[in-house]
Amino acid sequence: MELELDRTQLNGYTALLDTTIFQEETLEMIVPDACPDILRVVDTGGKVLLRGREAMDGRAEVSGTIRASVLYVPDGENGIRHLDVVIPFTCAAEGSGIGPGCTVVACARFRRADTRAVNPRKVLVRAEAAVDLTVFSPIRENICCQVLEAEANHVEQLTEKQEVCITACVQEKPFTISEEITFSAGKPAAEELLRSRVALVCGESKLIGNKLIFKGNANVTVLYRGEDNGIYTAGGELPFSQIMEISGVGEGADCALSLALTSCDCQLSPVGDGRIVSLNLDVLSQAVVRESRTLEVLADAYSTREPLTAQWDTYPMEVCLDAGVRSQNAREAWDTGTHVRDVTDCCLSVSQVTRSREGDRLILTAQVEVMVLYLGEDGGCYSAQRQISVPCSLEEPESCRCFSRCEPAGDVYATPAGGGLELRFVLDFHYWIMAGRQVTAVSALEPGQAAEEAGEQPSLVLRMLDRGERLWDVAKRYGTTIADIISANELADESAAVGKLLLIPRKR
């Protein structure tokens, strides 16, 4: 007897690697002839631009550029000047199963930097980037869900519903933001742009049909030297709205969207008398779409007419235990060792999120780098950097796997206090808690050999269900059906068979 099985095709992705890489680069640079000599280095800030991602045998590689801006006090001149430093980098992580067919999702952030003046015309810049890297491998499984023409072939089948969570789609889309920022009339016009930073924030995303609609802002902050040689900041929110094509998911799916800056051009506009900045940003949006699904699988089958031999396969799956966003408020007193008269600029970068356990609690800890540019008691410009740890506690079982990311929610506030500063900021922890699940299903049914039974077998059997035994197990053992057992014992349903002496009619 040839039996045909109906199969459900399951397409998705599995994460082979999820890590953060720190890449440090060093560069010596000669001060351009057009710039004045260096008297004192004040601070080094910057941004990281993502350039390329590639999966190869056993490893994933990410390349990009660190664009650093060195602020310094010039020798013999007033105000602050800057040097633009461009440092290319390439970093990699190894992982089992990674190959050319994998998809790499990456986001790169500026972590920290410092600059040493070798002499008035030469600097040594050391800068570090943090790269979040996740590598996905495609999976394609054909899982048996039922026996075709089961009734005609006298086949009884047991199907089970399994709740699983599938990473159904990993998709990306590049887009461009072109906009202008106009300085407030209450601030001096800009004589020179010193540096800029961009925070990409996704505010809302929604799946409608096969389209992912997402909105957000590029929050831009510009540090500039005014006409009076003072240091000022200006900024603006550049809104964006995009549509990304997504396939193979329903509207109830959950989307984790990451945004990476790939190009940034920020210049003073030739019009506007030093009060307009033109911006052109290239952004790569990367969407990881997870969807909870109910799979119906063929758990077992037998024939009441002739013996069958079943084969089973086991499929590794996952289920989503929890997903959401936790906000954590942070407040920190910072002793800078010098009197702070006024704060000029303050920025924050999340370098990485580590995971640890305390019993049944999962602790996510964000390592945060904070940089403050301030005016000292003597009116000079100075900077200070500090690393702060911010924990977030979740109640999750030990065997789970956690995917997380952390980003600032709003601005960071730094105010002079006592002998230093007081910092206040909020972090949003986005998390997905996944647990492994093994799904077992019949993969083949073939004609079998009848078991030899000693002596004459009774046509009727009286027995009770053993502990943990199902009515299915009894029906299969004696070559009958659940329906026949229920009918012979006048039961309302299967649950009524527990604890009763059952009459088991035999078909063969």
Image (cartoon, rainbow, N blue to C red):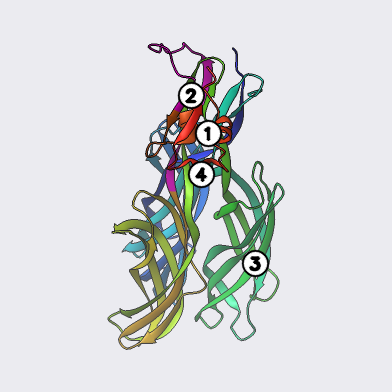
- Name the residue tied to disc 1: 139
Give the distance between the C-alpha atoms of the residues marked 1 and 3, in whole angstroms.
38 Å
Give the distance between the C-alpha atoms of the residues marked 2 and 1, in whole angstroms.
49 Å
Circle 2: is it few (<14), some (14-19), or many (20+) Cα within 10 Å? few
Give the label, 1 or 3, closer to the camera: 1
| Marks 3 & 2, CB-CB < 8 Å contact | no
Residue placed most toward the observer, 74 or 504 = 504
Q: Amino acid at mark 4?
A: Ala
The answer to whether residue 79 shows anywhere in this view is no
Task: From the viewer's perspective, tell me whether residue 138 is left or right of residue 244.
Answer: left
- Extent of the magenta region: 435-461
Magenta region includes residue 436: yes
Which is nearer the N-term, disc 3 or disc 4?
Answer: 3
Circle 4: is it few (<14), some (14-19), or many (20+) Cα within 10 Å? few
Horizontal and vertical percent position of residue 130: 41, 54
- Name the residue tied to disc 2: 460
Give the label, 3 or 2, closer to the camera: 2
Q: Amino acid at mark 3?
A: Leu
Give the distance between the C-alpha atoms of the residues marked 3 and 4, in whole angstroms.
65 Å
Which residue: 28% across, 59% down?
A: 359
- Name the residue tied to disc 4: 496
Give the distance between the C-alpha atoms of the residues marked 4 and 2, in whole angstroms.
20 Å
- Name the residue tied to disc 3: 238
Circle 3: is it few (<14), some (14-19), or many (20+) Cα within 10 Å? some
Task: From the viewer's perspective, tell me whether residue 184 is left or right of residue 392.
Answer: right
Horizontal and vertical percent position of residue 97: 42, 32
The label number, if any, that marks residue 82 in the structure image: none
